[in-house]
Image: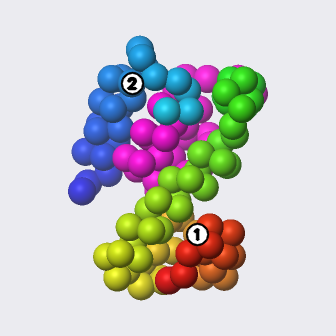
Amino acid sequence: MPIGIIGERAKSILHQLSAEKSLSEQINALLSADLRRYSQQQYVCEQLHMSRSTLYRKLKAEQTSFSELLDKVRKKKAQRGIENNLTVEQQCQQLCFHDSSSLYKAYRRWSISP
């Protein structure tokens, strides 16, 4: 999918959720729709029109953090990738890990094996 289409899809999902969902659910939707773009907190802040400190404070009020939400989405996508027989290299790209050792550490943390 071209990046423009994915961005529009993410905006559409965010618009639908913003009136009725918690901030963590909105962020989860963004991460699920386009992990490559929204794995960096600054892009989530831009999309939600809030500063990093506001995002941090609101997520803390929901008893979570951006890194926890990112980790949950990555875990779910990793499990799907394993089911679909993706290689470790493909998983690294899909999950926005810089190298395979970071991915293997995450696998151990999640108690899953490739």
Eye-nearest disc, 1 or 2: 2
* Residue 27, numbered circle: none
Q: Label 1's element?
A: loop
Image coordinates for residue 44, horizontal then vertical, percent: 55, 37
Is 13 displayed left or right of 68 in the figure?
A: left
Q: Which residue is drawn at the image coordinates 47% and 46% (left, top)?
A: 31
User: Going 29% across and 39% down the picture, which residue do you hit?
Assistant: 9
Identified at 66% across, 48% down, the residue is 68
* SS at mark 2 in the image: helix
Residue 35 included in the magenta stretch of the image: yes
Residue 52 visible, this angle: no
Mark 1 and mark 2 lie on one chain; the one further toward the N terminus is: 2
The residues colored magenta run 26-54
Task: State the residue at coordinates (41%, 77%).
Answer: 82
Residue 15 seen in the figure: yes
Which of 73/12 is in front? 73
Most foreground residue, 83 or 43? 83
Q: Disc 1 marks which residue?
A: 97
Q: Position of residue 53 (x, y in %)?
A: 75, 27
Total marks shown come to: 2
Q: Is residue 10 left or right of residue 53?
A: left
How busy is the neighbourhood of tag 2: few (under 14 within 10 Å), some, or many (20 plus)?
some
Q: CA distance from mark 1 to mark 2?
A: 28 Å
Q: Quadrant of residue 98?
A: bottom right
In this view, 71 is above or below 31? below
| Quadrant in which the N terminus appears | bottom left
**Residue type marked 1:** Phe
Per the image, the residue denoted by label 2 is 17
Q: Amino acid at mark 2?
A: Leu
Residue 108: x, y in percent? 66, 76
For the residue pair 66 and 11, the one nearer the viewer reads as 66
